[in-house]
């Protein structure tokens, strides 16, 4: 008669199991890093898409601003009710896109917001007294600065010459 012999698997050495566990953990960590990198890439691509869309919109809107200027100039001369409605619709569309007019007249001149085209002598220093062309911003970024006339206080020649000398010395020295 045949005897049954029990076949038992030879026990693996403990170090082999530990090595496999380490390898398994290392692969799992690599997978987690790769997944995190992929998610970060997806976020970055989505953000770049959003920024590109905003830039495209800003460039298009910037091209339409001279059209708005012309409509407003025509309205000054024509005073037409229909044209006024069109201008209001135009401004409403700009507003929904985040475009705002930059308030300039009566404000302090800000070189980051305004473009000075002329300076006139007056009682106030650095005060915007006239807007030659309206300016606009989109989402708090200047799209087109307003062109403005700035009032400057009279500076006598002696003070002006001293300021120039001081400036030359600070640049040289």
Image (tube, rainbow, N blue to C red):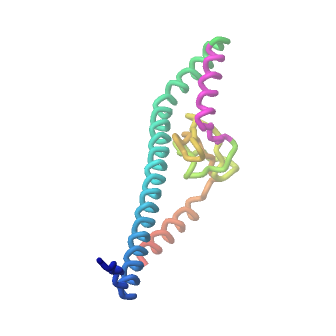
Looking at the image, which residue is at 45% across and 54% down?
A: 44
Question: Is 13 on the left-hand or right-hand side of 71?
Answer: left
Looking at the image, which residue is at 66% across and 50% down?
A: 108
How many discs appear?
Answer: 0
- Magenta-highlighted residues: 83-105
74 above or below 156?
above
Q: Provide residue 122's location: percent of width, then percent of height.
A: 66, 47
Figure quadrant of the C terminus: bottom left
Q: Provide residue 106's location: percent of width, then percent of height.
A: 70, 43
Looking at the image, which residue is at 47% across and 74% down?
A: 170
73 above or below 122?
above
Residue 113 vs residue 52, the one in the foreground: 52
Q: Main secondary structure of the magenta part?
A: helix
Figure quadrant of the N terminus: bottom left
Residue 28 vs residue 158, the one in the foreground: 28
Question: Is 39 on the left-hand or right-hand side of 132?
Answer: left
Name the quadrant containing residue 24.
bottom left
């Amino acid at each position: 008669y045949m005897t049954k012999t029990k076949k038992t698997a030879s026990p693996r050495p403990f170090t082999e199991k530990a090595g496999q566990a380490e390898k398994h953990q290392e692969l799992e960590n690599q997978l987690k890093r790769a997944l995190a990198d992929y998610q970060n890439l997806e976020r970055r691509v989505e953000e770049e898409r959003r920024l590109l869309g905003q830039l495209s919109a800003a460039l298009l809107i910037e091209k339409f601003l001279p059209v708005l200027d012309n409509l407003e100039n025509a309205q000054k001369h024509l005073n037409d009710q229909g044209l006024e409605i069109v201008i209001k619709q135009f401004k409403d569309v700009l507003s929904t896109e985040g475009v705002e007019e930059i308030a300039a007249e009566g404000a302090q001149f800000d070189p980051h917001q305004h473009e000075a085209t002329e300076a006139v002598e007056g009682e106030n220093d650095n005060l915007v007294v006239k807007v030659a062309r309206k300016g606009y911003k989109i989402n708090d970024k200047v799209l087109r600065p307003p062109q403005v006339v700035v009032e400057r206080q009279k500076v006598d020649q002696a003070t002006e010459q001293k300021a120039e000398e001081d400036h030359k010395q600070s640049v040289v020295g």
